[in-house]
Image (cartoon, rainbow, N blue to C red):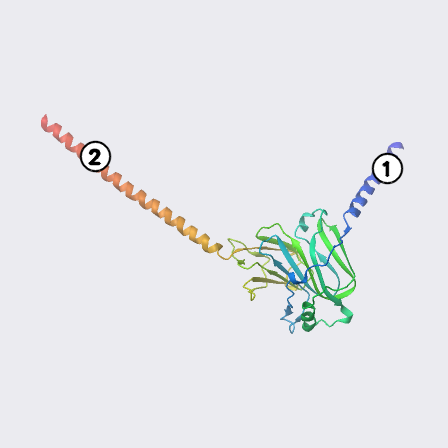
Amino acid sequence: MKMKTKYVFILLALLVIFISGCIDQKKEITLDEPGNISSYEFEVFLDEWDNEIPANTTTYYIMSDKTEVQAVHIVINSSKLEIFPPDSLGGGGPEKDPIKNFVLLVEPANETVASSETFVRLSNNSNVSDINYTLTQDIVRSMKVVNLEFEEPVTGFIAYTLETPGTQSFTFMRPDSEFIRVVLPEGYVTGNRVFGIARPEPSDTSFDEKGRQTLLWISSKMGDREEAIQVKYYTESAPMYFFAAIIALLFGVAMVLSRYSRSKKELESVREIFELEKEYEEKGRRKNK
């Protein structure tokens, strides 16, 4: 009877530890100051396939130093947004806030018409929106997730900055948006299987007015298993330098082979001369005999 009681207490203790651990993983994020509106690009992306009207869109702008990514969401009648930091797949620890420079340019959805004119007006605002919201960080299925929740549905722009490892590869969980865009830093591209490609393959690739390559995915055309997107990119000059190095290497190999061939011929000539001299010496010895 004592043994059974002991096991019951052990199970209860383990259950308490497990529950407390789950509770500790969730915390509220408090941002000390509003973000800087001028640091973001609030592009009014329109759905070309549906009379060019605004649609739920997430755009990631990879910064030139590759240590930060700016995310800008176009949300329409949304009350919740899930944000997956780049370290989501690792589960990451909650030591520091996963987002920074948080900017809201939104209005209550029931007071706003989701038109291109509305988004153009919001993009020109100089002050952030005075809307109540909560930010919480949680671990769900071993993935770090930041939940942004509003008291009522909103329409407008949501922007924030994420820290990245600084490599020429950007991997992120597919956001809950119909259109997903990645804008590479100026001077960088993707698409060469030797240097780096995007997976899954984007629906469209183009260049903006600043010469930056822009990749576009359409969620409704992606498979259910395609939950993550990875973009490996490289400098535009990388293939040229690579092939130049290959040509230089081949030229060097050709020079070595050519020199080897000449040296071999010279050695053969010297050997022939040596054999002729040896033959003359032998003939001379025979005459003397």
Foreground of the two, 86 or 226: 86
Residue type at the position of mark 2: Phe
Name the residue: 28% across, 41% down: 264
Question: Badge 2: few (under 14), some or many (20 or more) residues near its Cα, within 10 Å?
Answer: few
Residue picked out by circle 1: 9
Figure quadrant of the C terminus: top left
Name the residue: 64% across, 58% down: 70
Left or right: 189 in relation to 174: left
Q: Quadrant of residue 72?
A: bottom right
Q: SS for tag 1?
A: helix
Residue 257 visible, this angle: yes
**Circle count:** 2
Residue 274: give its label.
2
Tell me whether circle 2 and circle 1 mark residues in contact (CB < 8 Å).
no
Upstream in the sequence, badge 2 or badge 1?
1
**Real-space Cα separation, disc 2 to disc 1, in angstroms:** 99 Å
For residue 14, above or below residue 205: above
Foreground of the two, 236 or 194: 236
Question: Badge 1: few (under 14), some or many (20 or more) residues near its Cα, within 10 Å?
Answer: few
* Place of residue 46 in the rendered image (x, y in percent of width and height, measured from the top left): 64, 70
* Place of residue 144 in the rendered image (x, y in percent of width and height, measured from the top left): 71, 51
Figure quadrant of the N terminus: top right
Name the residue: 17% across, 34% down: 277
Q: Quadrant of residue 63?
A: bottom right
Query: Residue at the left extreme?
Result: 288
For residue 278, above or below residue 43: above
Left or right: 203 in relation to 288: right
Q: Quadrant of residue 61?
A: bottom right
Residue type at the position of mark 1: Phe
* Place of residue 107 in the rendered image (x, y in percent of width and height, measured from the top left): 75, 67
Q: SS for tag 2?
A: helix
